[in-house]
Image (spheres, helix red, strand yellow):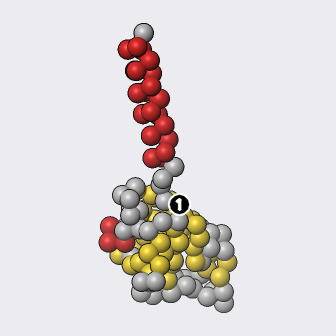
Amino acid sequence: MIDRRAHAAALWLGLVSLTSTAQAHSHLRASVPAAGARVASAPTEIRLQFDESIAAPISHLSVERSGGPAVAAGAVVCDPNDHTALVLRLAEPVPAGAYKVNFRVISADTHKVKGSLLPRATVS
C-alpha cells in the first residue's frame, strides 16, 4: 500500500513539474510593426518584444512575402537597453504588400519559441 502511494505521489509531482515547465516559455508580447498593422512606409527594422530575455546570437527572424520567398533574413540583435527586445534591421525597404514575419528564438532559460505574424506595408 505504501508503495502505491509513493508511486502515485511521484507521478503527481512529475506532472506538476511538467506543467510548471510548460508555463515558463517566453511569449511574444508586441511587435513593430504590429501584427495585422498597415504602415504608410516600409519599415527599416522588425522589432519583437518578448516577456523574458532572449538569446539573440542563436535566434532567427525572417520576412517573406505572403506565400512567397524570404525577402529579408539574418542575425538579430538584442536592444542594448532591453534584452527582451529582438531587432532585425532590414538592408533594403520591402515593397508594398503583405508579409509574414517568422521567428525562432531561444529564451534565456533555453526554451525554444517559434511563431509568425502578418504585418502589411502599404507604401504610397
Q: Residues within 10 Å of mark 1 (few under 14, many from 20)?
A: some
- Indicate left or right for 70 with 100 as reference: left
Q: Amino acid at mark 1?
A: His
Asked whether 86 or 123 is in front, the reply is 86
Q: Position of residue 83 (x, y in %)?
A: 44, 75
Quadrant for the N terminus in the image: top left
Quadrant for the C terminus in the image: bottom right
* In the rendered image, the vertical position of residue 91 relative to residue 51, given as above or below: below
Q: Position of residue 103 (x, y in %)?
A: 46, 65
Residue located 35% across and 75% down the image? 75
Residue 69 seen from this side? no
Q: Which residue is mark 1?
A: 27
**Total marks placed:** 1
Residue located 51% across and 77% down the image? 47
Q: Quadrant of residue 66?
A: bottom right
Task: State the SS at label 1.
Answer: loop
Residue located 57% across and 85% down the image? 42
- Indicate left or right for 111 with 34 as reference: left
* In the rendered image, the vertical position of residue 99 relative to residue 90, given as above or below: above
